Amino acid sequence: MGKNKSGSKKGASSSSPAKKCTCDHPYQCSCGNRPERPSKGHKWDPATQQWGGKGHKQKGASGQTATVAQAESVTAVGNVAVKQWQKLPSKLLADLCKKNSKE
């Protein structure tokens, strides 16, 4: 609880300064002057001689892909042009049945 009243000063350097890591690899050290990595994903920053953060990790919606545009189609019965964003009633009914099926 109390303060240390010994003669040592804060920030006093020891007899030999810490050696710098000269390895170029961001994860593996062959010289032995690098501290242990905190956990997988941290990268070594040679400028500051410290382990950096893990960086941004995207969560959710990573499996979504862009859809490819479809050409306008013409139905056989009635010669009705169906746009890319439109669905026929039979397709809507089939999708609804598939969604509500109990299989």
Image (cartoon, rainbow, N blue to C red):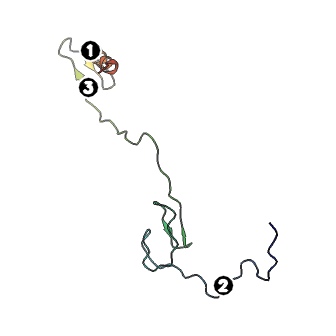
Q: Secondary structure at mark 2?
A: loop
Q: Position of residue 74 (x, y in %)?
A: 21, 20
Marks 2 and 1: which is nearer the front?
A: 2
Which residue type carries mark 1?
Ser
Q: Position of residue 83 (x, y in %)?
A: 30, 23
Question: Is 2 positioned to the left or the right of 79 in the image?
Answer: right
Q: Position of residue 82 (x, y in %)?
A: 27, 20
Q: Secondary structure at mark 3?
A: loop
Which residue corresponds to the image point at 26% horizontal and 14% vertical from the top-left? Answer: 90
What numbered label is drawn on residue 77? none
Instruction: Examine the rendered structure and indicate whether residue 88 appears above or below residue 48.
Output: above
Q: Position of residue 66 (x, y in %)?
A: 34, 38
Instruction: Examine the rendered structure and indicate whether residue 21 appears above or below residue 98.
Output: below
Which residue type carries mark 3?
Glu
Residue furthest out toward the top: 78
What numbered label is drawn on residue 14? 2
Task: Return the residue at label 1.
Answer: 90
Q: Secondary structure at mark 1?
A: helix
Task: Return the residue at label 3.
Answer: 72
Locate the N terminus and report the quarter of the image it occupies.
bottom right
Marks 3 and 1: which is nearer the front?
A: 1
Question: Is 4 positioned to the left or the right of 68 in the image?
Answer: right
Res 70 → quadrant: top left
Residue sitting nearer the eye, 92 or 18:
18
